[in-house]
Image (spheres, rainbow, N blue to C red):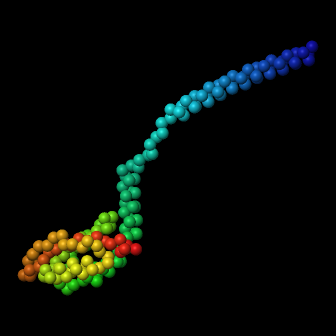
Amino acid sequence: MLAWGIALFCLVVASAGGLHALQYARVAQAAGKDLARLESRRIVSAPVQPSKAQADVQRRWDALAAERAFNWYPVFRALEQTTSADIELLEFVPDKPGRRIVLRGEARTSDALISYLGAMAAQGSFDEVYLAHQKRIQRAGMSLISFEVRAVIAVRASK
């Protein structure tokens, strides 16, 4: 009789375990369907845009990298080779991203200014050299020509 009781007990425990396993399988199947449904409705978020401060810091780093990578030697060498006693350069304004320069200065005569423009144009470091502005001025009793020259820095100058 004890054997029949143990067998009946084992049968009840096995049946309860089987029902529990069947119920667990149904829950898992329902969870799988819910997961598939949610994944199909999932919205792909846009990449996170950097904050204004982060963008500003990145812009500064990019500007510093561009400054370090730019080869100024050919530009300055070309300007030194075009020096003249009749020309005084007062301002040098570079635009590295645009590969342009603006030179402001004074010349004693218009012939000296024309000669200076020709010497700059003959340099291999500059393209599209032109006189953007000129004006006759009086300084210390002398008549001078104030000028602005613009040029494109040749691509071959940065190599």
- Looking at the image, residue 105 sits to the left or right of residue 23; the answer is left
Expressed as whole percent of the image width and height from the top left, the position of residue 39 reads: 54, 34
Expressed as whole percent of the image width and height from the top left, the position of residue 6 reads: 87, 18
**Residue furthest top as drawn:** 1
Residue 115 can be seen in this image: yes
Expressed as whole percent of the image width and height from the top left, the position of residue 70 reads: 37, 70
**Residue furthest left as drawn:** 141
Q: Residue at x 16, y 74 (%)?
A: 147
Q: Residue at x 11, y 79 (%)?
A: 144
| Quadrant where the image shows the N terminus | top right
The quarter of the displayed image where residue 85 is located: bottom left
| Quadrant where the image shows the C terminus | bottom left
Q: Residue at x 28, y 73 (%)?
A: 127
Expressed as whole percent of the image width and height from the top left, the position of residue 21 reads: 72, 25
- Looking at the image, residue 79 sits to the left or right of residue 60; the answer is left
- Looking at the image, residue 124 sits to the left or right of residue 48; the answer is left
The quarter of the displayed image where residue 72 is located: bottom left
Query: In front here: 72 or 12?
Result: 72
- Looking at the image, residue 129 sits to the left or right of residue 154; the answer is left
Residue 87 can be seen in this image: no
Task: Determine whether 82 is above or below 40 in the image.
Answer: below
Query: In front here: 67 or 148?
Result: 148
The quarter of the displayed image where residue 38 is located: top right
